[in-house]
Image (cartoon, rainbow, N blue to C red):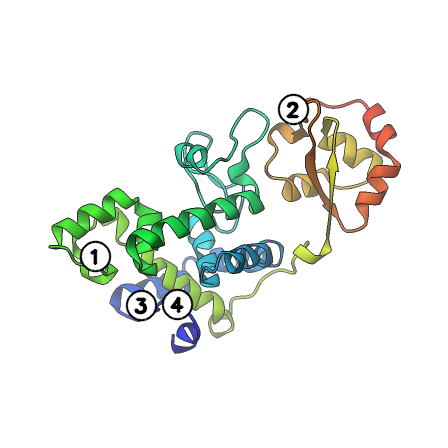
Amino acid sequence: MEKLNEGSDIQFVLNTAVKEKIIFYSTKAKGVISRSMSLAPLYFPLIEEELRKNNLPTELKYITIRESGLNPSAGSEKGPRGLWQFMPGTAQVLGMKVNAYVDERKDPLLSTRAACVYFTKLYKLYGDWMMVMAAYGSGSGTVDKAIKASGGKKTYWEILPFLPAVSKDHIPAFIAIAFVYTNASLYNITAAPAKFSASALDSIYISKSVGFEQIAKVLNLSQNDLVLLNPVYNKQRIHVEEGKTRLLVLPLGEAANFRREEKEIHKHKEVVH
């Protein structure tokens, strides 16, 4: 735990609640850690870069494991969704589009940028990262009520007794996840080799609507891989409004192939999902 605290603005502590969560994530929920370790090469570099750009603690990345298991498609349409599990209303306030064609809560980059805006706003309110994460998980209204009920206490562990039961696990879970993830070898937790990493991707802006099935057939790619790399698009299709462009993420080296075969891709009959 001392190693986690080295150079971090977040104070990681070890208490009974945290110990219980460490046991949980190193035993019954070790699969969550293992799967997240497999996805980390794809998402953590992007998340860390955005956090650094905004002068935020990079350890905040572990919230995505607690919230979504590092799966940008996790959640439900009417409830929270994405790596950071934004509710539709919060997404709208933060400027993310959610419609029949796209759900920007599922876009790793756009949602992380929105999360950075949200974290910055919360830190200005509370000035304490544990309080920020409590407000992120439970809502600032819930935290404000707990502060009032505690007689004006300003730290998370002081207001903890006054939080609703459903909100009391957020911080212990975050600390436990960070601890178990960074010490996975101690618990014999391993990850399958990552299929993709952030450094092995290509991206290209396209100006014409196209289906994933069309791209996959012509470029001989896995349609499931296209879905994995482009979770922001609904219905396995990129809808591009006239006069605008949309980003398509591809395996490394495939952007040039897309440009070369673009006419053939659009000729291919699209399967509507």
Q: Of the two numbered discs 4 and 3 on the same chain, state the one appearing first in sequence.
A: 4
Q: Which residue is mark 4?
A: 9
Q: Of the two numbered discs 2 and 1 on the same chain, state the one appearing first in sequence.
A: 1
Alpha-carbon distance for marks 1 and 3?
16 Å
Which label sits in the foreground, 1 or 4?
Answer: 4
Q: Secondary structure at mark 1?
A: helix
Instruction: Judge by depth and name the residue closer to the eye, 104 or 24.
Output: 104
Q: From what the image shows, is residue 100 above or below residue 90?
A: above
Quadrant position of the C terminus in the picture: top right
- Identify the mark at residue 110; answer none if there is no mark: none
Instruction: Judge by depth and name the residue closer to the eye, 23 or 13.
Output: 13
Q: Give the residue at x 27% y 49%.
A: 167
State left or right for residue 145 relative to residue 85.
left
Q: In the rendered structure, are the residues bearing label 1 and label 3 in contact, judged by CB atoms less than 8 Å apart?
A: no
Amino acid type, callout 4:
Asp
- Image coordinates of residue 143 in percent, x first then y, are 24, 49
Q: Which residue is mark 1?
A: 160
Alpha-carbon distance for marks 2 and 1?
47 Å
Q: Which residue is mark 2?
A: 273
Alpha-carbon distance for marks 1 and 4?
20 Å
Q: In the rendered structure, are the residues bearing label 1 and label 4 in contact, judged by CB atoms less than 8 Å apart?
A: no
Q: Which residue is mark 3?
A: 19
Which label sits in the foreground, 2 or 1?
Answer: 1
- Image coordinates of residue 30 in percent, x first then y, are 46, 60
Q: Residues within 10 Å of mark 2 (few under 14, many from 20)?
A: few
Q: Secondary structure at mark 3?
A: helix
Alpha-carbon distance for marks 2 and 4?
46 Å
Q: From what the image shows, is residue 17 above or below residue 88?
A: below
